[in-house]
Image (spheres, helix red, strand yellow):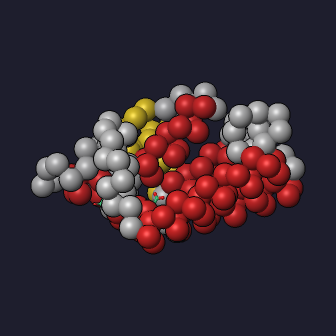
Amino acid sequence: MTQLTLVIGNKNYSSWSLRPWLVMKQFGLEFNEIRIPLYNSPDYSSKIRQYSPSGKVPVLLHGTQTVWDSLAICEYLAETFPMQWWPEDKAARAFARSISAEMHSGFQNLRQNMPMNCRTKYSGKGLASVVQQDIDRITSIWQESRQKFGDGGNFLFGNFA
Ligand SMILES: N[C@@H](CCC(=O)N[C@@H](CS)C(=O)NCC(=O)O)C(=O)O
């Protein structure tokens, strides 16, 4: 089988990197991992550019194919390895795609003011009212997903896979 390689940044800071990493682990795909610590050395950007045309991580390498951007990677994997990546039910799938796209392109205020750092806690730091609006929207997405599609498991759409 053609080798999969996922190029990522720091798992603690790069939630974008964690997205394909988590699903690949969850679906049991074997892959090499190339980790490039972000922002901590002057040449980190040129290291990323060796793999990524956008200069961002994550990037997936699969044979001659390069796929960058976390959502594009997940879609590529879903096509290449047919498993239950998206919910089976059409309405649930449309909802899942909508919230994934919303997450992918939105919540700028939250990202900017409360960036991910799983290793520590900064209680309330960065919590401006525009950030609270993002949090409220995320909470309502989670509630609606659970209410409409969550039967049969503990995740937003029931079972993870
Ligand atoms: N929309 C992109 C965002 C990727 C992104 O912003 N990656 C950040 C790390 S979290 C990055 O590579 N930053 C390096 C830089 O900007 O120099 C995706 O989903 O993959």
Q: Position of residue 14 (x, y in %)?
A: 38, 49
Q: Position of residue 82 (x, y in %)?
A: 74, 41
Residue at 70%, 59% (x, y): give it.
97
Residue at 58%, 39% (x, y): give it.
23
Kindly tell me whether residue 1 is visible in this rendering: no
Q: How many marks?
A: 0
In the displayed structure image, the side of residue 23 where residue 39 appears, left or right? left
Nearest the camera: 13 or 7? 13
Determine which quarter of the picture holds residue 27: top right
**Outermost residue to the left:** 42
Residue at 46%, 43% (x, y): give it.
18
Q: Is residue 88 above or below residue 52?
A: above
Nearest the camera: 36 or 141? 141
Q: Position of residue 92 (x, y in %)?
A: 81, 53
In the displayed structure image, the side of residue 114 where residue 23 appears, left or right? right
- Quadrant observed for ligand 1 in the rendered image: bottom left
Kindly tell me whether residue 42 is visible in this rendering: yes
Q: Is residue 91 above or below residue 84?
A: below
In the displayed structure image, the side of residue 13 where residue 66 appears, left or right? right
**Outermost residue to the bottom:** 130
Q: Position of residue 136 (x, y in %)?
A: 57, 62
Residue at 85%, 58% (x, y): give it.
91
Q: Quadrant of the N terminus?
A: top right
Q: Quadrant of the C terminus?
A: top right
Determine which quarter of the picture holds residue 37: top left
